Amino acid sequence: MRYVIIGAGAVGGTIGVRLGEAGHDVTLVARGAHLDAIRRRGLTLRTPEGTATWRGPATDAPGEGPLPADTVLVLTVKSQDTPAALAAWADAPVAGGGTAGERLPLFTAQNGVANEPAALRLFARVHAVCVWLPATHLEPGVVVANGYPHPGMLHVGRYPDGSDALDHAVAADLTGAGFVAPVRDDVMRWKYGKLLANLGNGLQALLGGDVPADLRDRVRAEGQAVLAAAGIAHTSTEEEAAERGDRVGHRPVDGQERSGSSTWQSLARSVGSTEVDHLNGEIVLLGRLHGVPTPANAAVAYAVRRAARERIRAGGFPPAELAKMIG
């Protein structure tokens, strides 16, 4: 199989480099200064075990020729960038006829739970991936992955449920590249559990490393209440911890711990947008649909949007102002 990694940032860059190092045919999709750096000097992956540099094809869009029929598309952009990425790739021609949306499998290795239904509008074969992968992308051409002894755990399964031979084949490739990659018939249950964990991302992006425990507990409690009202199953923290065990921990890279979550990284890079509306915003949406108040998650989503819009530095939002907003 040939892998096209659509979004070679923290998660996509780690997956792409590790698959490439394992001997697989990999094309990275990136944009701007990051794409320029990859084309000039390759993509450098720094890990607790050392540094590797992958050099291979990189692009910002499908080429003029058809995609090979054995291509696997792996979508790793942040959720706010999903619509544009899907639109760019769904109608790309495939060798032998048809389009990518009609013929090629799409694996959504992303935070949140809105990417899969969005993908299914354009792609007939959607596979969800629950991502546990501590990595950071702040510098063009460089990704830092702190996971150890495995770089990450990637739960794989069909969307909306079940699994097939392709899931097992991709999981085997990921395992050979160093990841832990269980195949799940209920992969969305794991993704909803990850969504609850990600509700603290916005708080950490706003306040830095010193997030009051009561705020973390409050946004998660709202999330749990919403999922219960909606009848949506999710994994528990105990189940997740038992599954992860000591297989995916955190270790410093070149003496430095991981800087922050994916939302924190968006503020740190001043990209002007974040995935908060697909994390805390997902809880707000479900709360409104099912009559469950979610004031804390709504306030966090608004504050992160404001921080992105006003270029407030990561970790620099006034704590007293956030507390007042939450109430």
Image: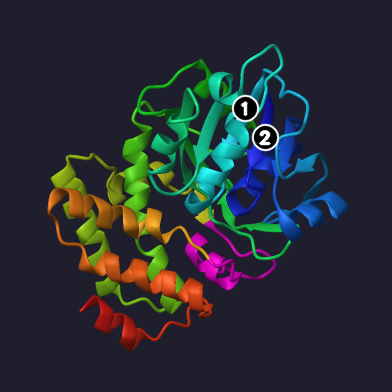
Q: Is residue 268 magenta?
A: yes
**Whether residue 146 is visible:** yes
Which numbered marker is on residue 4?
2
Residue that carries the numbered disc 1 in the rendered image: 72
Which numbered marker is on residue 104?
none
Mark 1 vs 2: CB contact within 8 A: yes
* Residue 193 pos. (x, y %): 32, 47
- Point out the image quarter for the N terminus: top right
Distance from label 1 to label 2 (Cα)? 6 Å
Relative depth, front residue between 185 and 308: 308
Q: Which residues are magenta?
A: 250-272
Q: Residues within 10 Å of mark 2 (few under 14, many from 20)?
A: many
Relative depth, front residue between 37 and 152: 37
Amino acid on which disc 1 is placed: Val
Relative depth, front residue between 147 and 300: 300
Up/down of 208 relative to 7, above or below: below
Amino acid on which disc 2 is placed: Val
Relative depth, front residue between 180 and 25: 25
Give the mark, 1 or 2, whose residue is nearer the N terminus: 2
* Residue 268 pos. (x, y %): 57, 72
Residue occupying the far top of the picture: 96
Q: Is residue 326 left or right of residue 103?
A: left
Up/down of 227 relative to 277, above or below: above
**Residue at disc 1, secondary structure:** strand
Residue occupying the far right of the picture: 40
* Residue 48 pos. (x, y %): 66, 57
